[in-house]
Image (cartoon, grey):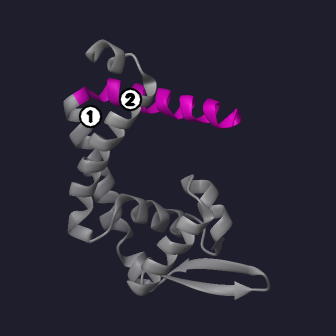
Amino acid sequence: MEQYFCGCLYFTANHLARLMNKMAEEEFTQLGLSPTYAFLLMAVHDKPGITQTELSNTLHIAPSTTTRFVEKLEVKKLVERKNEGKLTLVYLTEKGADIQADIKVCWKNLYNRYADILGEETAKQLTNQTSLAATELEKHK
């Protein structure tokens, strides 16, 4: 039975995703954020005034999920929304800007954990191959 699962991209990708998610959540526990919230905050930091549609596209999540995440980060006073006509723009608050360095440390710690286990070259290759596969599959949705 094992050989069927190990040869299935769906199964192995989900298995890897669960393991990586557990590691990432452990690293971000100290900030009280999920890894996805941290990515959202990084995206807003990189592009102040980003629209929720752009955030959805950047994070590869549904617009309704983006709205829910932004609302939760607003409650934590990490982002704020400003309306400009029909657009809703998202900005970091001072508190959101202040934790950017801590977010980068968490991402670095996560990278170091899995690179120590897999080896740095394998970690980089796996990341690159996974990204290329996702991009290619996305073209054919």
First reached walking from the N terminus: tag 2 or tag 1? 2
Q: Residue at x 21, y 56 (%)?
A: 26
Q: Secondary structure at mark 1?
A: helix
Residue 41, relative to residue 126: is it above or below? below
Mark 2 lies on residue: 11
Image quadrant assignment for residue 58: bottom right
Q: Residue at x 79, y 86 (%)?
A: 85
Expressed as whole percent of the image width and height from the top left, the position of residue 18 reads 31, 43
> In the image, is 38 to the left or to the right of 112?
right
Image quadrant assignment for residue 12: top left
Question: Looking at the picture, which amino acid does disc 1 mark?
Answer: Ala
Residue 93, relative to residue 4: is it above or below? below
Was residue 33 drawn as part of the magenta stretch in this picture? no
In this view, the residue farthest toward the top is: 3
In this view, the residue farthest toward the right is: 85
Image quadrant assignment for residue 134: top right
Residue 115 is marked as: 1
Residue 89, relative to residue 124: is it above or below? below
Q: Which sits in the foreground, 129 or 119?
A: 129
Looking at the image, do the residues carrying marks 2 and 1 touch, with CB atoms under 8 Å apart? no
Q: Which sits in the foreground, 105 or 39?
A: 39
Expressed as whole percent of the image width and height from the top left, the position of residue 141 reads 68, 37
Question: Looking at the picture, which amino acid does disc 2 mark?
Answer: Phe
Q: How many marks?
A: 2
Location of the N terminus by quadrant is top left
- What stretch of residues is rendered in magenta? 118-141
